[in-house]
Structure formats: structure tokens, C-alpha cells
Amino acid sequence: MSTPTPSAPSAPSALSAPPTPQITDRHPLALALFGLTMASGLIDAVSYLGLGHVFTANMTGNVVVIAFALAGAPGFSVAASVTSLGAFLLGAVLAGRFTTGRRTGRLRTALALEVALHGVAAAVAFAWTVEGSVARYAVITLGAVAMGIRNGTVRALGVPDLTTTVLTLTLTGLAADSRLAGGTAPRQRRRILSVATMLAGAIPGAVLVLHGQLAWALVAGAALAGVTALLYRE
């Protein structure tokens, strides 16, 4: 009687792959992204209120603003919004180059570039009035490149409900997954904190701009990103 030949071990399937480690709300990466969400609120307040109804972080808003301008709505500029959109895409391309094949150091690199670009934008705002076309477009370009780099990097990290710039899906999940909707309310605290940190950045940013301190608001945005970089641990 022949002995059956043992079969070779099968290759591990996708279902048996080890799960991705969960990023809790107290994880250093999550804390860093909360800090950047606050910075985004501040930067959007600066760009929309101080640079002529243009966004440098929220590209959904920019696309809508372009439509408003094309329709002839007063106070909106096609050129400014297209400049911001193009600069943001450039930043996202650079982020893709930085993150390809890298497992560590991606966020720290993006933070360093964001601090530098917003710092230069603040220097431009201190040196020239942003109502002037050249200075205005320089600040828009620098800010949008910085936010494109950050968004591309955060996207590669893939932490749920922490995009740092857009809250639409976060708010949708907060409502659609709630117990009121019959769900289990997963990541409810994270979603609420994302909204709260965006508000916490947008309010002082708006106050500074409305009191004629746009350059200092940019300094505050750069400082917030810098502090986040200093406190972040891989």
C-alpha cells in the first residue's frame, strides 16, 4: 500500500494576510493628522477671506468657485482659482514622487516642505500687499503647492476619516453610521474631533484675516505644521 504524498503548502491567500495595524485616535500619526486638520482650517480661512474667494486646501470648493466665476458672479476669479488648482496638482505630483517606495519619513518630509512654503508665503505677505496681483498669486501658488504635497502624502498613508482637508465623507459617515441610522457608530470620536479641529483652526484664522493680519495667519499655519512635525514620532 503506497503512502500518500503530502501536498505542498498552498500559497497564502489575500484573506490570510495579516491585517493592517489599526491607527487609534491616540496613535502619533492620528494626533499629527488632527494637528494638520486644524492647520487646514486656518489656511482655508486665509485663502478664502484674504486672497479673494479662492481655496488653497479645499479643491472641491475651488472647482465650484471656478464655475461661479464663469457664470459671472462678482468677487470670484477664474485665474486665481485655476492657479491654485494647478499649483495643488503640482504639489500632489511631488508628493507622489516622495512617497513612491518609501515606508517611513513621508509625513515628516511633507511637513518640512509645508512649513517652508507657508513661511515663504508669509514673507511675501509681509513684504508686499496681497491686494497686488503678483504678491496675491505668489501666496496662492505657494500655499496650494504646500497643500497638494500634504494631501498626496496623507492619501498615501490612508488613515480613515483623517484626510486633514475635506470633511464631506467624514460628516457623511458620522450620520450614516450612527445608531440613529441603525449603525454601530464606528470612529465616532475621530470624526467629531476632525470637525472640531477644523473649526479650531478656521476661527482664529478668520479673526486674524478680518483684522488685517493675513501674514501673521500664514505664520500661525506654518508654526502649527512645524510644531506637529516636532512632536510627531514615526
Image (cartoon, rainbow, N blue to C red):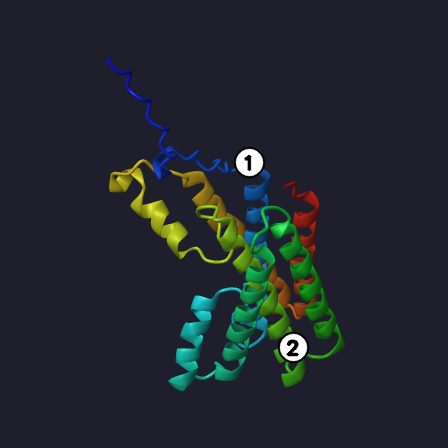
- Compared with 56, 181 (above or below) is above
- Compared with 18, 2 (above or below) is above
Q: For mark 1, give the secondary structure.
A: loop
Give coordinates of residue 160: x percent, y percent: 44, 46
Residue lying farthest to the bottom in this orientation: 72
Give coordinates of residue 178: x percent, y percent: 32, 41
The quarter holding residue 202 reads bottom right
Quadrant housing the C terminus:
top right
At horizontal 54% and vertical 43% (from top left) the residue drawn is 30
| Callout count | 2
Residue 43 seen in render: no
On screen, residue 113 versus residue 2, left or right, reads right
**Crowd around label 1: few <14 · some 14–19 · many ≥20 (10 Å):** few
Q: For mark 2, give the secondary structure.
A: helix
Residue 57 seen in render: yes
On screen, residue 136 versus residue 77, left or right, reads right
At horizontal 37% and vertical 28% (from top left) the residue drawn is 9
Q: Mark 1 highlights which residue?
A: 26
Give coordinates of residue 206: x percent, y percent: 58, 63
Residue lying farthest to the top in this orientation: 1
Quadrant housing the N terminus:
top left
- Mark toward the start of the polypeptide (1 vs 2): 1
The type of residue carrying mark 1 is Arg
Give coordinates of residue 209: x percent, y percent: 62, 68
- Compared with 145, 17 (above or below) is above
At horizontal 43% and vertical 78% (from top left) the residue drawn is 66
At horizontal 64% and vertical 81% (from top left) the residue drawn is 131
Q: Which mark is residue 84?
A: none
Q: Mark 2 highlights which residue?
A: 138
The type of residue carrying mark 2 is Ala
User: What separation in Å lies between label 1 and label 2 (alpha carbons)?
Assistant: 37 Å
